[in-house]
Amino acid sequence: MKFASVALSALAVSLASPALADHHQAASTETAAPYPMTPQGAADWVAAVEQDLFNYSVQASQVYWINSTYITEDTDALAAMSGAEGTEKSVRYALEAAKYAEVAGLDPVVKRKLDILRNGIVLPAPTTAGAATELNEIATRLNSMYGKGKGTLNGEVINGSDIEAEMGNPERTPAELAEMWESWHDNVGAPMKGDYAQMVAIANDGAKELGFSDVGAMWRSGYDMDPDDFTAMTERLWQETKPLYVALHTYVRSKLNEKYGDEVQPAAGPIRADLLGNMWAQEWGNIYPLVAPEGAGDIGYDLTDLIAEKGYDEKDMVKVGEQFFSSLGFEPLPDTFWTRSMFVKPADREVVCHASAWDIDNKDDIRIKMCIKPNADDFITIHHELGHNYYQRAYKDQTYLHLNGANDGFHEAIGDAVALSITPEYLVQIGMLDKSEVPSADKDIGLLLRQAMDKVAFLPFGLLVDKWRWGVFDGSVTPGQYNSAWVELKREYQGITPPVDRPADAFDAGAKYHIPGNTPYTRYFLARILQFQFYKAACDQAGWKGPLHRCSFYGNEEVGKNLGAMLEMGASKPWPVALEAFTGTQEMSAKPMLDYFAPLMKWLDEQNKGKPAGW
């Protein structure tokens, strides 16, 4: 199964597992006598389904790995066929699971697995003839369109991996940034619009057959709580953190206004989307040098420069990430990880460069797929992706439907919590930074500002992607409103506006990988909150006494033991139980995040005095 910034496209998979079915093994559930509608019958049916799905998921993962690392018409066709078979089977299992769920006296574990089967499909196809095939052909086509996407820079064609890097280059002019932004959104997003609308219609029909009003309602049902309560929880977490975001937005806007002037970036209102160092303005760390205040903003070192000074190549960077987990007591990565992963973009073929972590055989064949560049962003991303791999391996002994994180935000948060531990002290421990170069306490604002440019800046984007999709799925956002709704949500939540006027027929949402990739996005918002809960719990267990943002739990095997105990649970328990196992509380809270950034918030308030807040 693939996680973390990874396409679940065309699979119509369960969030808890690759909800696919083995066409070679289908006899076990399709030709055998029906299992009786009794508690034992339900248990036997679930066991047969799990075996079926386990067997097929291995083959399907191999197909999708090849398609993502070798994009051709043939691999597209194979992926679409595999996905269509999986979609048909996953929907059939979901419909049957709904029936068994009505049986009285079910074993609680069986009941939980029935709920996973029914609630966890990402793209459900209806049972009408040909619907699954059409749905998967569209989803595969969208994924490949993104993978092949190109923009332009100074009139020259530039691929997706390179254009992302150049959007983060603070030396690019506003005109160059606007060209890259506009060309990427026009070339990649706009052609997808018709296919995307058709895919939504088909998937909604499938969701209705399963008893849901639409696909978005189905997605929200998979969090061990009432969907409305889940929506309320995410809104609560956003409202708790919004003042910190607004303060950051106000400060960054003022610095961009100082640099570019009113004609490029006005002193009030939204920020121009292409000026924030990221194609989607979702993380702003790349422009830190432009907004860092003199003295307080200098953190004393540059991680990208440190990587260059060490002479690390792509695999060396991954080895450093592995070393962190080894220091906590986790077993080294298997040899196959090093021979089967994709670390660099091949020169001879099209691939999906978007970073992802894979578990091919549900046991030990774990891999990452990245087009690594020797920079700070990819160094941190490597730690994130390895977090997925170590989580996957930790729960490998669970039964099939429990081969997942406690919720999808957990999976994203593990690696991010480790990445928070990439502090100056950690860099000293691993020999990347000289002890004499560790920033003194007066540099803490710089350290925190740099972190907030990614962690805090991301929060509203983490919410709005699925808010947009929920509107698309429930029909409140029609195809004719796709782009206007996207632009308005980005303005409302992020305070961001496009650098150029957008035509009515644009499809800017499609220029974000997770939209054509059909990867639910709320997980990333949850992960931003959870990672600070995990991080603080780890620091508390390690006995850290200094400022929270300076903590590194590198080398603490007690933390590793406790973390491993939670990871091994997989999806076998409701997420509040898993959360409590490591943090001591069942409630998701933004307080650790606010505690982490408290010194920065105080400083931002001082810097922002007299400046217009909000947009």
Image (tube, rainbow, N blue to C red):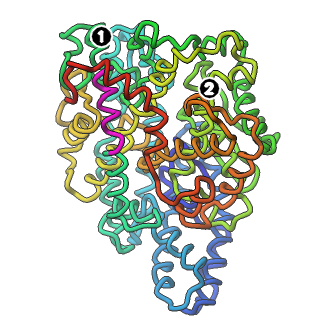
Q: Where's residue 377, x and y in %?
A: 55, 25
**Residue 355 figure quarter:** top right
Residue in the foreground of this view, choosing between 313 and 537: 537
Q: Where's residue 428, x and y in %?
A: 71, 20
Q: What amino acid is at disc 1?
A: Ala
| C-alpha separation, residue under disc 1 versus residue under disc 2 | 35 Å
Name the quarter where the C terminus is drawn. top left
Which numbered disc covers residue 175?
A: 1
Which numbered disc covers residue 252?
A: none
Q: Does residue 141 appear in the picture of this structure? A: no
Q: Where's residue 89, x and y in %?
A: 53, 69
Tell me: 356 left or right of 475: right
Q: Where's residue 482, x and y in %?
A: 23, 43
Residue on which the image places disc 2: 423
Taking the view exactly as shown, the residue that stands out farthest to the front is 545
Tell me: 346 left or right of 10: right
- 246 inside magenta stretch: yes
Q: Main secondary structure of the magenta part?
A: helix
Q: Secondary structure at mark 1?
A: helix
Q: Magenta residues, as a range?
A: 240-251
Considering only order in the chain, which callout, 2 or 1, is on the residue closer to the N terminus? Answer: 1
Callout 1: few (<14), some (14-19), or many (20+) C-alpha neighbours within 10 Å?
some
Callout 2: few (<14), some (14-19), or many (20+) C-alpha neighbours within 10 Å?
some
